[in-house]
Amino acid sequence: MSTELKASSLKVQAFLSQHGQDFVVQQMPSSTRTAKDAAEAVGCTVSQIAKSLIFKDGETGAPVLVVASGSNMVCTDKVKEATGITLEKADASFVREKVGYAIGGVPPVAHNEKVQTLLDKDLHQYTEIWAAAGTPNSVFKLNPQYLGELTQGQWIDLAK
């Protein structure tokens, strides 16, 4: 694996370092754009991939980050029931403008602006998970406890 990080991954690495974490962003030789690709690249199960999905709050238009287990689909009805937020799809330009990353490389941290974050309770079953780190082929390893601390996210049941 290459050690040379792109600017977006360096931004994630700086965030992690500034928050007292020794997590290391890794540039992979193959794509980590999808949960399946990422799992193959790092050698874990698809469920251990913490995929970061940006939605739009249907009422306010604000970005909402949902970090879901790679094998789960997000149930918008469960999110609405747990939080009162109506999730709407966000297009690529909205995602890049609001969080600063392209779809396929959105990390759970180091965004352009503060983002309300919802976390998939299913991730708690793993001692080790992997998240995108700013590009479609960079990742970092962490545990669910740190994911919660770094994102200040709300843990909910959100899987279909």
Image (cartoon, rainbow, N blue to C red):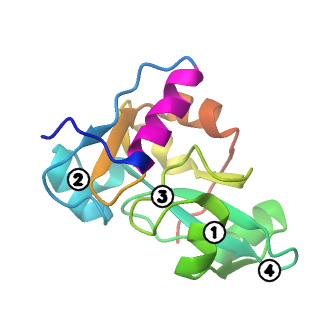
Q: Is label 1 in contact with label 2 (beta carbons under 8 Å)?
A: no
Using the image, tell me which numbered label, if any, was put on residue 58: 4
Q: Is label 3 in contact with label 1 (beta carbons under 8 Å)?
A: no
Mark 4–mark 2 distance (CA, rounded to whole Å):
32 Å
Instruction: Identify the image quadrant of residue 9.
Output: top left
> Hey, what amino acid is under mark 2?
Ala
Given residues 159 and 147, the one toward you in this image is: 147
Secondary structure beneath label 1 = helix
Q: Is residue 71 left or right of residue 43?
A: right
Q: Is residue 23 above or below residue 92?
A: above
Assess whether residue 15 is covered by the magenta stretch. yes
Q: Is residue 149 above or below residue 2?
A: above
- Residue bearing the label numbered 1: 97
- Residue bearing the label numbered 3: 106
Q: Earlier in the sequence, mark 1 or mark 4?
A: 4
- In front: mark 1 or mark 2? 1
Secondary structure beneath label 4 = loop
- Residue bearing the label numbered 2: 39
Q: Is residue 71 above or below residue 10?
A: below
Q: Is residue 59 left or right of residue 118?
A: right
Q: Earlier in the sequence, mark 3 or mark 4?
A: 4
Mark 1–mark 2 distance (CA, rounded to whole Å):
27 Å
Mark 1–mark 4 distance (CA, rounded to whole Å):
17 Å
